[in-house]
Image (cartoon, grey):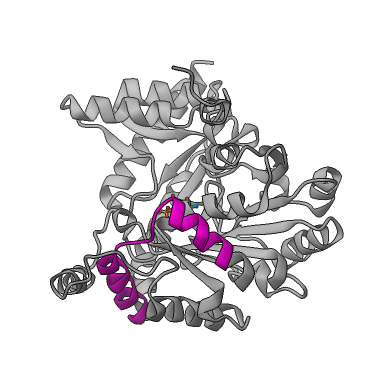
Amino acid sequence: MRLSSRIEGILGGGSDAWGLFIRARQLKDAGQPVVELTIGEPDSRTAPAILQEMHRAAMAGHTGYAAIPGIAPLRDAIAARVEARTGVPTTRDNVLVTPGGQAALFAAHQAVTDPGDTALICDPYYATYPTTIRASAAHPRAVATRPEHGFQPQAADLAAVAQGARSLLINTPNNPTGAVYSRDTLDGIAQVARDHDLWVISDEVYDTQVWTGDHLSPRALPGMAERTMVIGSLSKSHAMTGSRLGWLIAPPEAIARMADLAVTTTYGVPGYIQEAGLFALLQGPDAEERNAAPYRRRRDLALSLIAGQKVVRAVPAQGAMYLMLDIRDTGLGGTGFAEALLDRHLIAVMPGEGFGDAAAGHVRIALTLEDAALRDALATLLDFAAELSRAR
Ligand code: PLP
């Protein structure tokens, strides 16, 4: 039977970021000792106290349908966190609780684009961005960011394609580049958004992982609260990827409409997960810092190892749990290098090409291995790169 062109077109025929990841998992399932530096899956597990609260809540009966926009105390806690971190007045009416940040990305694009609209993204991008936009029957249009600008989007590049577009999706701290957008960058983005009447969808799921500079939300800039939607999540800040708990911050009228969307899609988030999320948020910023600390340490460790050789160059991440490595001096592209590294050394990294054309010639490593294992894997990667470069 024929399927809709929308669902057939979700992948869009572009580079498949997941091909190498799937092959690595197949090798692992077949018993091979594959070292995975691929997806952003924290190597720490959800804190026992959060799991205990999940259990308590389930035993207390929070197992039925839960309030669709989210339970009031959780929406209040999210609003309080956002207000404390950004200074923008925020109430529960600005908050929709979603099953993870991904569902919030989907809801945001459903809410702001009509079929055939153009939705802007910055390249390199998180691998689900184009598919999320195509699932809304809109067209993703990528705007390249460049290493010479520290992968910060330039207002002139955005303005050049903004005419007629409906939205601009940004991500700071950025996956995969690690860029943390500066005040100047965000002022430029805000100006383009106001000039061209764009919604800004700001993915801030790594807002607890900032290594240099400060995290700034575009929603805090003048005139931006009414045209900005912010994506948040407990996946990375509290190692809760599997619990699927995130949120969307937007003007109240938009939240009300997206609650209607949730009625027809997710029907909300399980009550015992929301209770556990509330407990997690109430642990405050110290718990978030404890979760973020290993990534900062490993980023420093990896950068110092990379500084000791000349073939592989690191993009010095300012935030998030990844490092992008420029491997062009090996003579291979990102995909070729990642395939060869998996074949020769059973180390799996993500090819840059899966994150857009601007990441070609790079691979992304996730800093999700404990320190000694990360050091060993990276040393092997660097030796392999040196060997390839000598053989050129
Ligand atoms: N946004 C970015 C930039 C991500 O890297 C991820 C996950 O890796 C997500 C959103 C989705 O996170 P989740 O749906 O687990 O909250």
Above or below: residue 10 compared with residue 86? above
Please give the name of the residue rendered at 21% of the width and 69% of the height, measured from the top-left corner: 54
Above or below: residue 2 compared with residue 16? above
- In magenta stretch: residue 277: yes
Please give the name of the residue rendered at 54% of the width and 42% of the height, measured from the top-left corner: 132
Place of residue 297 in the rendered image (x, y in percent of width and height, measured from the top left): 39, 61
Report whether residue 145 is seen.
no
Above or below: residue 214 compared with residue 35? below
Above or below: residue 55 compared with residue 171? below
- In magenta stretch: residue 106: no
Q: Is residue 356 left or right of residue 260?
A: right
- Identify which residue, 268 or 307, lies in the foreground: 268
- Identify which residue, 144 or 246, lies in the foreground: 246
Place of residue 269 in the rendered image (x, y in percent of width and height, measured from the top left): 35, 61
- Identify which residue, 9 or 141, lies in the foreground: 9
Q: Is residue 259 left or right of residue 62?
A: right
Question: The N terminus appears in which quarter of the rendering?
Answer: top left
Quarter assignment of residue 115: top right
Q: Which residues are magenta?
A: 256-283
Q: Is residue 130 left or right of residue 349?
A: right
- For the stretch drawn in magenta, the main secondary structure is helix
Please give the name of the residue rendered at 65% of the width and 36% of the height, measured from the top-left corner: 358
Place of residue 195 in the rendered image (x, y in percent of width and height, measured from the top left): 86, 59
Report whether residue 164 is seen.
yes
Question: The C terminus appears in which quarter of the rendering?
Answer: top right
